[in-house]
DNA sequence: GCCAACGTTGGC
DNA sequence: GCCAACGTTGGC
């Protein structure tokens, strides 16, 4: 039985548009680490603020692109801290409410690239796995940019990665 | 580019 | 606090 404790890391799925910032950009960032700025959804923010722990796993997902899917694995390197772009008038992430209150209403975390996948796991492949049917990402109309991933779902994803390492997705 | 489905806003 | 209108997300 899975027992929740402070040792086992949480697993998160974090969406990004690769045209804006891809997993490969993260790989090439100094220290392979970047701050995950620009999250502007309360539920996603609250996950970072209340639930993110250093050492948590982050599955980096590419959205709004030709082949959406999981591109790489990252790790949470910091606790949540205020996202300063909310207070930057020249940033596309500038936030009116934050400006009015003179305090960022948004948070971010530092994410480190751990390893790219042998190949991107397409959304279509995730959909084809029965064991992932309840995964948040796959639910109709799901748009949340930061989602918790269940331990058993993560295990299935790791198995998919292991298979693709040797055989590619042709084996699926 | 379309559009379904969602989150947010604001009038009442 | 309701809910219609609007804006956004994101697969296709």
Image (cartoon, coloured by chain):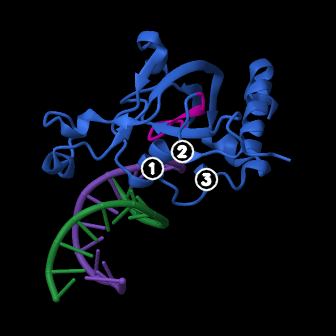
Chain colours: A blue, B green, C purple
Count the labels in the image.
3
Secondary structure category for the residue under label 2: helix
Residue A54 higher or lower than A149, as above or below: above
Same chain check for tags 1 and 3: yes
Furthest-right residue in this view: A1
Label 1, residues with CA under 10 Å away: few <14, some 14-19, many ≥20 = some
Point 46% across, 11% down: residue: A31
Pointers 2 and 1 in contact (CB under 8 A)? yes
Name the spot of residue A7 as percent of width and height, x first: 70, 33
Residues rendered magenta in the picture: A55-68
A46 left or right, relative to A164: left
Which circle marks residue A116 in the picture? none
A146 left or right, relative to A154: left
Of all chains, the one bearing label 1 is A
Of all chains, the one bearing label 2 is A
From the image, tell me which residue sits under label 3: A136
Query: Observer-nearest residue: A95 or A168?
Result: A95
A164 left or right, relative to A138: right
Q: Earlier in the sequence, mark 2 or mark 3?
A: 2
Q: Which of the 4 image quadrants contains residue A168? A: top right
Point 15% across, 46% down: residue: A99
Residue B7 higher or lower than A118, as above or below: below
Name the spot of residue A84 as percent of width and height, x first: 25, 33
Label 3, residues with CA under 10 Å away: few <14, some 14-19, many ≥20 = some
Point 36% across, 40% down: residue: A107
Query: Observer-nearest residue: A56 or A92?
Result: A56
From the image, tell me which residue sits under label 1: A46
From the image, tell me which residue sits under label 2: A51
Q: Earlier in the sequence, mark 1 or mark 3?
A: 1
Alpha carbon separation for disc pair 2 and 1 = 7 Å
Of all chains, the one bearing label 3 is A
């Amino acid at each position: 039985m899975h027992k929740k404790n402070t040792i086992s890391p949480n697993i998160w799925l974090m969406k990004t548009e690769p045209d804006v910032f891809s997993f490969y950009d993260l790989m090439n960032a100094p220290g392979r680490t970047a701050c995950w700025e620009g999250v502007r959804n309360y539920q996603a923010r609250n996950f970072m603020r209340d639930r993110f722990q250093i050492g948590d796993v982050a599955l980096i997902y590419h959205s709004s692109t030709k082949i959406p899917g999981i591109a790489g694995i990252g790790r949470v390197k910091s606790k949540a801290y205020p996202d300063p772009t909310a207070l930057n008038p020249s940033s596309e992430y500038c936030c009116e409410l934050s400006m009015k209150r003179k305090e960022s209403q948004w948070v971010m975390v530092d994410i480190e690239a751990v390893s790219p996948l042998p190949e991107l796991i397409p959304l279509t492949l995730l959909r084809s796995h029965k064991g992932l049917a309840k995964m948040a990402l796959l639910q109709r109309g799901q748009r949340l940019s930061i989602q918790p991933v269940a331990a058993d779902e993560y295990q299935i994803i790791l198995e998919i990665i292991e298979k693709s390492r040797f055989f590619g997705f042709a084996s699926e």
